[in-house]
Image (cartoon, rainbow, N blue to C red):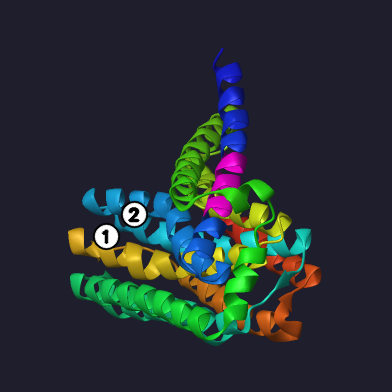
């Protein structure tokens, strides 16, 4: 009976992830149209922040419980997963066009966030309340600047607005009013969170049935589990041709993970005595650094570059499994 129930959990989780991502992308694009904001900025802010909700909940709960390893490890692991697994997979499905603004500003901000996290962690053996306050101020400034810049560009350049209007790929979405788009976006987020929980529950059951250790489950399934909303949203956006949302979601989520999650969690309880390894931090920095030249080559992330990113994630996961077996 448990096997059938967990099969149902897994299947229901996949369905909820798919429809949640579909609703979130459609609603987000419509909101971008009505608010005269480009789909890229919606991907970097609204969609990215929404899909990072599971990481926020996990990290804050861990901070309250005094578990700095889970709170910090969740952010570092998710950022690695977002670049190496999600962007890699999306690029394999369809090459991703890179917006020059994304390369010039948002990707460097993502790299800065990863570097600040590494420096703060290594010099302070964790993340203090002061570090958290700095991160929290950074996410407020970043969000305010992104929205203001997008509105300014839209007001000056009518082509930005026209491109946003043409980006909707469904006739139904064109007829959708703003309140309906907001409700659709909220419903999509709820389905994403529910789908991630159901899929993770079913996966953990079968992993234990196959006698996989809890350590490996935590390092692999749980780490990917909190990134499932980003994965589902970016893949659906890439398939639907909303490539700005696909890549903006990943970059924005990585910025949010550091500045917002590690801005809020340490303010509740400082993240002390964590035991992240140099390899974890190094892989996060490596992925963030490599993404810049990858984006610059032809202003797109090609299928070959997507395979390269996937290989990095596979190698990192293999290293985690080997370390847990020692």
Please give the name of the residue rendered at 45% of the width and 41% of the height, measured from the top-left corner.
Answer: 190
What residue did someone put label 1 on?
Answer: 265
The residue carrying pointer 1 sits among few (fewer than 14), some (14 to 19) or many (20 or more) residues within 10 Å by Cα, namely many
Q: Is residue 123 left or right of residue 285?
A: left
Q: Where residue 114 appears, x then y in whole percent?
A: 44, 76
Camera sees residue 189: yes
Q: Is residue 307 left or right of residue 105?
A: right
What residue did someone put label 2 on?
Answer: 59
Is residue 21 inside the magenta stretch? yes
Please give the name of the residue rendered at 41% of the width and 66% of the height, measured from the top-left corner.
Answer: 256
Q: Specify the quadrant of the image occupied by residue 322.
A: bottom right
Q: Identify whether 183 is placed above or below 313.
A: above
Q: Earlier in the sequence, mark 1 or mark 2?
A: 2
Please give the name of the residue rendered at 31% of the width and 73% of the height, measured from the top-left corner.
Answer: 140
- The answer to the question of whether label 1 and label 2 lie on touching residues, with beta carbons closer than 8 A, is yes
Q: Quadrant of the N terminus?
A: top right
Pick the front one: 53 or 209: 53
Residue bounds of the magenta highlight:
17-27
- In what element is the residue under mark 1? helix
């Amino acid at each position: 009976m448990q096997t059938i129930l967990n099969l149902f959990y897994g299947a229901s989780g996949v369905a909820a992830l798919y429809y949640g991502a579909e609703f979130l992308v459609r609603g987000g694009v419509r909101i971008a149209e009505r608010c005269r904001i480009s789909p890229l900025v919606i991907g970097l802010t609204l969609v990215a922040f929404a899909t990072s909700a599971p990481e926020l909940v996990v990290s804050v709960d861990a901070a309250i419980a005094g578990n700095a390893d889970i709170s910090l490890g969740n952010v570092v692991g998710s950022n690695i997963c977002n670049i190496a697994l999600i962007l890699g997979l999306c690029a394999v499905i369809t090459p991703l066009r890179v917006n020059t603004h994304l390369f010039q500003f948002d990707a460097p901000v993502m790299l800065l966030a990863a570097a600040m996290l590494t420096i703060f962690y290594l010099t302070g053996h964790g993340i203090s309340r002061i570090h958290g306050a700095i991160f929290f101020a950074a996410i407020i400034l970043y969000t305010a600047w992104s929205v203001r810049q997008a509105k300014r560009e839209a007001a000056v350049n009518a082509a930005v607005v026209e491109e946003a209007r043409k980006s909707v790929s469904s006739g139904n979405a064109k007829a959708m009013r703003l309140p309906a788009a907001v409700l659709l976006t909220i419903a999509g987020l709820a389905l994403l969170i529910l789908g991630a929980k159901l899929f993770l529950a079913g996966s953990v059951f079968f992993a234990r049935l196959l006698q996989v250790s809890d350590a490996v489950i935590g390092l692999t399934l749980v780490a990917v589990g909190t990134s499932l909303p980003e994965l589902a949203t970016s893949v659906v956006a890439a398939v639907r041709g909303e490539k700005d949302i696909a890549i903006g979601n990943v970059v924005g989520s990585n910025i949010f993970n550091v500045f917002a999650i590690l801005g809020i969690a340490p303010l509740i309880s400082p993240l002390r005595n964590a035991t992240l390894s140099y390899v974890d931090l190094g892989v996060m920095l490596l992925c963030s650094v490599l993404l810049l030249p990858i984006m610059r080559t032809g202003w797109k992330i090609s299928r070959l570059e997507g395979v390269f990113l996937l290989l990095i994630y596979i190698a990192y996961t293999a290293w985690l499994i080997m370390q847990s077996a020692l």
